[in-house]
Amino acid sequence: MTRRIDLMEDFVHVFDHEQMVAFFEIQCPRADAEPLRGLCRVSKPKTQATMRYLSLSFMIDTADDAARVAADACLGRLEGEAMTAVVSMITSVMSMPVSATTAENYVRQMDVMLDEHVDPGRFFIEQRLVPALRQLAQIQTGEIVWWGELAEDRPLEPAVTASGADSEGLGARLRRYLGGHCAQR
């Protein structure tokens, strides 16, 4: 018997070892097609780790092989020494293997290793990390949704919308999925 992979469940399941800090919607532009849309989840270790790092999990809607190749090329720009060259507080970036990728979704996880004196909190994410992601991967990002603020009873509108598309974006689906879970954490 095979188990159906539920990416939204797997996206949240990381809570066993990591604490979700924030997420935001992304768009990867393509010259010959509509931009690819997805999410970036930012998390950190739940326990005091010997090394400071943030884990970035990208999940992008991909309708076909061309979209998967484009997503891989877009996020591939973040690997190697690219991030360390732009943000001196980042010491290295390590791609992590991901088993939850499906034909409809491209998933990529990276651990961003930080200098021991860096506070991997809101200021670093807003002022250093996200601008570096925009610059290097040439992506657009939506509003950063902070995990602790999701429990507040306020409407959250998707920051990046699919122009004219009827399908619900990943950000909206994640917000809906997490709606009841946030107040419990």
Image: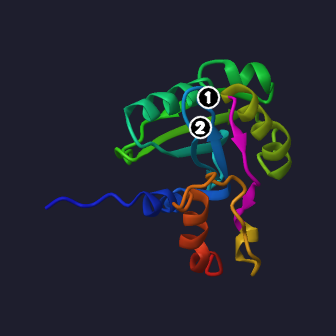
Image-based side of 158 in relation to 131, left or right = left
Pick the quarter of the image with the C terminus.
bottom right
Of mark 2 and mark 1, the one earlier in the sequence is 1
Q: Magenta span has 142? A: yes
Relative to 42, is 111 above or below? above
* 47 is higher (above) or lower (below) than 180: above
Magenta run includes residue 158:
no
- In-image side of 127 versus 91 (left or right): right
Three-letter amino acid code at disc 1? Val
Vertical arrangement, residue 93 with respect to residue 169, above or below: above
Q: Would residue 46 be visible to someone looking at this image?
A: no
Q: In front: 140, or 48?
A: 140
Q: Which residues are magenta?
A: 138-147
| Callouts 2 and 1 close, C-beta under 8 Å | yes
Which of the numbered marks, if any, corresponds to residue 111? 2
Residue holding disc 1: 93
Q: Residue at x 76, y 36 (%)?
A: 116
Residue 173 percent location from the top left of the image: 55, 65
Quadrant where the N terminus lies? bottom left
Q: Residue at x 76, y 69 (%)?
A: 149
Q: Please state which of residues 78 and 28 is positioned toward the viewer in this rendering.
A: 28
Which residue is situated farthest in the left direction here?
Answer: 1
Q: Is residue 35 left or right of residue 143?
A: left
